[in-house]
Amino acid sequence: MPDTKMNVLGIETSCDETAAAVVRDGREVLTNVVYTQIPLHQPYGGVVPEIASRAHVEKIAQVVGEAMKGQRVDAVAVTYGPGLSPALIVGLNAAKGLAKSLGVPLIGINHLEGHLHSPFLWDAPEDATYANPDPRDLGPALGLALSGGNTMWIDMPAYGRYEVIGETLDDAAGEAFDKAAKLLGLGYPGGLKIDRLSQAWREAQVARGVRASALPFIPFPKGRPRDGVTALAGLLAELCVSFSGLKTALLRFVQQHPEAREEPELSRVVASYQEAIAQAVADRTRAALRRARYGALVFGGGVSLNSRIRAVLADVCREAGIPLLMAKPKYTGDNGAMIAGLAYYRRNHVADAMALDANPCLEVGA
């Protein structure tokens, strides 16, 4: 890797965030601009691809312009998958045109791999030192990507090498949170609302003298698939998860207990539901850590902001004697900085990025 400073502009439009950032040498975030479309999608209870792509078209020039203001750009990086095809196309076309006009290289980036880079980002100038190591010094690590559309465990024998070893068979963790929030009338997006209600409920229980180990959770299923399930596609059941049964269990509970939609029972319900997801994630992570010698757990994606999942994974890593590397809260969601940062290390990954098409089903490590 050359010692010269390199500024990469990253563009991210895989879903409902129009984002751009300039990152120096893969880690130092110089600018970071995100336009969120949440208000546009709230009336529908989820992301509408046509609305998302139209909003990207309307905002991308402004967002990219703000990110580039006053910055030198040596390369342009862009998400080309996975994600919503109409949304990806907007960012990809903008990045191609910009790279051509600036006369700089274009670098295509996998969105999920970008999330696994987010723990290595730091802000200039306030972070004079940053605890997380340079990713090239990491050694073998276990990656965990939790987001609205993905839940997967990834073997990372070295930085830039990825192999999926476990994943969800149906809903992603973020999707499971959003569907539960919709069922309970909490609105969209649901993950943050569920987390806040759950935190408040746990704190209230402890204040009343209830031990943390004896909280009166509803026993929702933790969703481990049976060994031999054909949908595992060669992956071990102990490293995979299914949230469809959990979702059904919540629906049945609410049908049998109408008071579940009202306080104080509502908070107990969402805390129990969140605990089931958190413990499912923790169980699969423990199993993955037992199967290989890893030096760290690299945790990224929008759901990595969830306070309970962070707490249980911190416990898992303490038990295993390895560090838990997580992104700063502002970089847990979709952002251009993670795309620009990863591009510095993966700039030769795609031979001719100008010929790339949007790939909504792009796999990790492809």
Image (tube, helix red, strand yellow):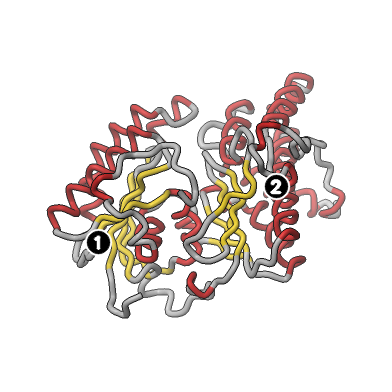
Q: Is residue 344 visible?
A: yes
What percent of the width, then of the height, locates residue 191? 57, 41
Q: Is residue 307 above or below residue 83?
A: below
In the image, what residue occupies the spot 54% across and 31% down? 187
Task: Name the secondary structure under disc 2.
Answer: helix
Viewer-side residue, 12 vs 329: 12
Residue pointed to by mark 1: 75
Quarter of the image for the N terminus: give it.
bottom left
> Which residue corresponds to mark 2?
239
Q: What residue is drawn where x is 47% and y is 49%? A: 112
Most extreme residue toward the top, as rendered? 255
Foreground residue, 212 or 150? Answer: 150
How far apart, in angstroms, are the residues tagged by discs 2 and 1?
A: 38 Å
**Mark 2 Cα shell of 10 Å, populated few (<14), some (14-19), many (≥20):** many
Q: Is residue 224 left or right of residue 142?
A: right
What residue is rendered at 47% in x and 60% in y? 118
Horizontal side, residue 208 vs residue 366: left or right: right
Q: Taking the image as drawn, is residue 17 in sight?
A: no
Q: Amino acid at mark 2?
A: Leu
Sooner in the amino-acid sequence: mark 2 or mark 1: 1
CB under 8 Å between callouts 2 and 1? no
Residue 330: x and y in percent read 45, 57
* Point 44% across, 42% down: residue: 362
354 relative position to 227: left or right? left
Q: Nearer the viewer, residue 99 or 187?
A: 99
Residue 336 placement (x, y as % from top left) = 36, 54
Residue 307: assigned label: none
Three-letter amino acid code at disc 1? Ala
Query: Badge 1: few (under 14), some or many (20 or more) residues near its Cα, within 10 Å?
Result: many
Looking at the rendered structure, the number of numbered marks drawn on it comes to 2
Image quadrant where residue 263 sits: top right
Secondary structure beneath dot 1 equals: strand
